[in-house]
Amino acid sequence: MNRPLRITVIGMLLATLPGGCTPYRFGIRSLYPPDIQTVYVPVFTSNSFRPALGERLTEAVAKEIELRTPYKVVGSPEADSILTGQIIRDTKRLTIESPTDEARETEIAFAVRVTWIDRNGGMIHEGNVPLPPASVDIMQTAFVHPEVGSSIATGQQEVIDRLARQIVSLMESPW
């Protein structure tokens, strides 16, 4: 075997050996911090006068965690981590009005502050890379069109479902 080919083959073999890099993970677990198994999600608080928004958002987030992550949602604050949230603003704004002053399109918007901490009250970390900051503000909107059968309740549920997906996406490890 000639010298350049031998060097190339040895280099390829050395490249396949495990090195000093972080261990490779695959599957759904690779997206999330490995030291977390359980998440406690207390009922999200709400500054809104609209009833049950916090409860509805909490339920949607818990279902999304169970559906998309390897974590188990538990009912005890003794879990590995605690995900808390607060609806800090909800608005309903008329965007399109008919000539007879009826709503043709209404915008529903929620702003939520979310905090994900470990059981000791510290930020969730993976190695030296911090996951989302201790508190993250997120916002989602949806449009309601009463003329085609949608209502404020369906618009609120659409916003809640979008927020739940966004909150659970924040739980993923950074690349």
Image (cartoon, rainbow, N blue to C red):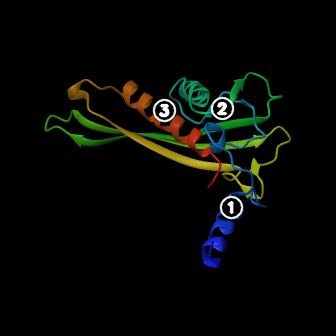
Give how far apart the Cα atoms at labels 1 and 2 are.
34 Å
- Label 3 sits on a secondary structure element that is helix
Q: Could you classify mark 1 by the number of other residues whose Cα lies within 10 Å: few (under 14), some (14-19), or many (20 or more)? A: few
In the image, taking residue 104 as reference, residue 38 lies left or right, namely right
- Label 1 sits on a secondary structure element that is helix
Placement of 90 over or under 6, stated as above or below: above
> Can you identify the residue that label 2 sits on?
70
Disc 3 or 1, which lies upstream in sequence? 1
Disc 1 or 2, which lies upstream in sequence? 1
Q: What amino acid is labelled 2 in the image?
A: Pro
Q: Could you classify mark 3 by the number of other residues whose Cα lies within 10 Å: few (under 14), some (14-19), or many (20 or more)? A: many
In the image, taking residue 157 as reference, residue 82 lies left or right, namely right
Residue at position x 57%, y 40% in the image: 167
Q: Locate residue 17: give its quadrant.
A: bottom right
Q: Quadrant of the N terminus?
A: bottom right
> Can you identify the residue that label 1 sits on?
13
Mark in front: 1 vs 2: 1
In the image, taking residue 82 as reference, residue 168 lies left or right, namely left
In the image, taking residue 45 as reference, residue 34 lies left or right, namely right
Residue at position x 13%, y 38% in the image: 99
Q: Which mark is residue 160?
A: 3
Q: Locate residue 20: give its quadrant.
A: bottom right
Q: What amino acid is labelled 3 in the image?
A: Ile
Residue at position x 71%, y 42% in the image: 116
Q: Which mark is residue 120?
A: none
Q: What amino acid is labelled 1 in the image?
A: Leu
User: Which residue is the extreme one toward the left?
Assistant: 99
Camera sees residue 155: yes
Give how far apart the Cα atoms at labels 3 and 2 are.
22 Å
Q: Quadrant of the C terminus?
A: bottom right
